[in-house]
Image (cartoon, rainbow, N blue to C red):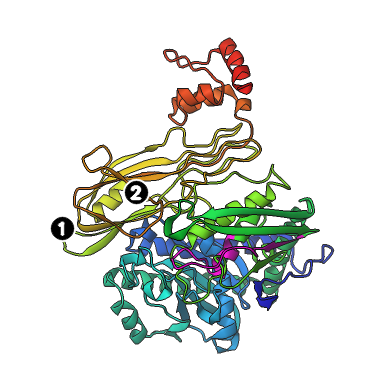
Amino acid sequence: MSVLNHSTVQPPMPAAPSDRVSRVDPVTLEIVRNALKAVAQRITRRMIRSANSFIVKEMEDCSASILDAQGQLLAEEAGPPIQLNTVGVCLKTILEHYLPPESWKPGDVVITNDPYAGGESLAATHTNDYLAFHPLFFKGRLVAFSGLMVHQFDIGGMNMGTRGWGTEIYQEGLRIPPLRIVEAGQLDTKVMAIILTNTRTREMLENDLISQISSVQVAAGDVLELFEKYGEDTMTACFEEMIDYSERRTREAIAAIPDGVYAHEEPLLDDGAEGGPYRLALTLTKTGSEMVLDFTGTDPHVRGPINSPLATTLAAVYYAIRCVTDASIPATEGCKRPIRVIAPPGTLVNARSPAACYQRMIVCHSIVDLVMGALAQAVPQQVMADSCGCLYNYTICTHPATGRRTVFGEVVPGGIGATAHEDGIEVVACHVTNCHIPPTEAIENEAPVLYLRRELRTDSGGAGRFRGGVGQVLSYRVLGDDAGLQHTSQKSVSLPQGVAGGRPGDGGRWVINEGLPGERVLEYAIGDIEPLATGDTVTHYTPGGGGYGDPLSRDPERVLRDVLEGKVSREQARHVYGVEIDAERLTIGTLAGQRLRATVKTG
C-alpha cells in the first residue's frame, strides 16, 4: 500500500501477460490448487470441531488462508468474506512493520487483534477477531504461511463481547500487537496469562485460542507433504501460475464491463440514530481491464463503533467485485490486482486510531450495496438489488443457575437482493457476513432464553420479476437477570432498493414485549444497550431484499408458490403482481388475472 494525494490506495499491478508459457503442467497445477484449498478447509474444520464458543462451533465465524512467503493469497476456505480478504492484508502489515520474513523461525505462531497495527488500519478487522499466522519452512527456507482468523467470544472491553455503542477503540477490549505467542514451538505462558486475565470467559478463550494456534500449526504438515512430493521449484511455479491465472481471468471479466465513470451514494444510520444519517460516496472508474474505486466524499469517521478499518473496506470491495465477475475464478491474490481503492484517511471507510470499529460491518455491508449500485448503471444484468444489511441481535444477562454473565444471540439473517436471473435468498446472514444461523436448541441449552417464534416475514421481499429474499420474524423471552439488548439493524428508513424496476424490500423494526402491557417499539434501529427485565420478550422484524425487474412480468405460477409458502400475501399478489389467487382452491384465475394485470399496469 502507498499514500498518494492524501488517500490510502492500492496501486494497480501491471497486466498479466496472456501469452506467458506456464512452467508447470495443468494437471499438476490443478492438483496443487485444490490441495491447498483443502488444507485451508481443514484448518477451519479443526477449529470449529474443537471450539467452545457458539460463535465458532455453531455460527462458524472463522476463516483460514494459505499464503506465500510474501503474504499473497493462494487459497482460502469459504468462510465470512470480511475475514477472508483481510488475512493476507494483515500478514503483509506484520511482514512490513513488525517481523520481516527473515526473522521468522520454524515453530513460530504470531497473533494479533489490533485493527491499527502498523499505524494505519490494515490489520485486524476488529478486536474480537484474533489472527494467527504460522510460517512454513521447507529445507530451511520460508515458503508459505498458514493463517486463521477467529472471532473470540469475549476479550474484555466496556461491555461483554464488546457490545454496545462504544466511542473509542480503548473501550473495545485488550489489543495485542503482532507478537510471537509461540516461539520455536514453545508457548509463551506470560503472553497467554495477560490475554486470559482480560476476559470474562477465561476457560472458553483459553480453549479457543489454543485451538486456533494448533489449527495453523497442524496445517504445516499438509502443505509440506506437497513440497516433498513435487519439489520446491514446481510448487513455487504453481504459486505464481495460480495468482497469474486468477488475474488474467479477472481482467477478462472486468474488460467486458463498459468503460465509464459511475457514481453512487448510500446512507448510514438513516433513522437519525447517533446524529445520522451519514453518507458513503463512491465514484467507480472502469478503464480497460482495471477499476478504480474512489470513496472521496464519504463522511468522516464518527464517535461510534461503525467505522471501517481500511482492511475491511478492501475486503468488502474485493467481495463485491468477485460477485460481478466470475465465481469460477479461483480466489487468489490475482483477483485483487486489477482493483485500486482510494479511501481518504479518517473517513468512515478508512478509520484512524482511536476511532471505534467494533460494528464496522454497518459500513461494510453498505459498501457492497454501494458498489452494486454504481455497477448497476453499467451492467444491470450482473448485479443484485440491495440486501438486508448488517443485523445483530445479542442479549447480555446473568445466568440464574450459574451467576455468570453471558451473551446469547446471533448475526441475524434477513433477505438478500434479487438478480437478473433468480429470486433473492431468504433468511440469510448476507454478503460479507455469511455466518450460519445457530440452532435454537443450542442457544437455549447454553443461555437463559426461550425462543418463541422464528418464521418467514410475509411481504418483506421487494417485488419484481425476480423477488427479493424475505426476512424473518424472530422472538424470544429473556430468562436471565440484569439483561440488556444490543440491537443493530439497517435499512429502516432508506429501504433496500430494487434494480431495473424492482421494488424495495421492507425495512426492519424492534419491539419489546409485543402484544403485552408495556409494549414499546425501539426508536432507533441501532443503539446502545437497551435495558431488559427478566421475562421481557424481544421481537425483531428483519428487512427483506430488493426486487429485480417489473413485478407485473413475474411468472404467475411463481406468485402462487410464494403465496402458498407464506412469502407473499394474497393482497400483495393482487395489488402489486396483478395475480388473483382463488382463496378456496388456491389457484390462479387466468382470465381475471390477465385483466387485473392490465388494470394494475395502468394504475
Residue closest to the far bottom? 103
Q: Is residue 153 visible?
A: no
Residue in the image at 47% along x and 63% along y: 306
Q: Which residue is mark 2?
A: 522
For mark 2, give the secondary structure: loop
Numbered tag placed on residue 351 in the rendering:
none
Q: Is residue 300 magenta?
A: yes
Residue closest to the far top? 591
Q: What are the residue bounds of the magenta stretch?
A: 290-316
Work out whether 268 lies above or below 453. below
Left or right: 148, with 333 as reference point:
left
Left or right: 208, with 278 as reference point:
left
Q: Is residue 595 magenta?
A: no
Left or right: 11, with 390 as reference point:
right
Work out whether 400 lies above or below 95. above
Name the amino acid, label 1. Pro
Left or right: 251, with 557 as reference point:
right
Contact (CB < 8 A) between labels 1 and 2? no
Question: Foreground: 456 or 135?
Answer: 456
Work out whether 396 lies above or below 178. above
Residue closest to the far right? 19
Q: Position of residue 544 (x, y in %)?
A: 48, 41
Q: Position of residue 331 (x, y in %)?
A: 63, 60
Residue in the image at 76% along x and 51% along y: 257
Name the amino acid, label 2. Leu
Question: Which quarter of the figure is the N terminus placed in?
Answer: bottom right
Q: Is residue 35 visible?
A: yes
For mark 1, give the secondary structure: loop
* Mark 1 closeness class: few <14, some 14–19, many ≥20 residues within 10 Å: few
Q: Which residue is mark 1?
A: 400
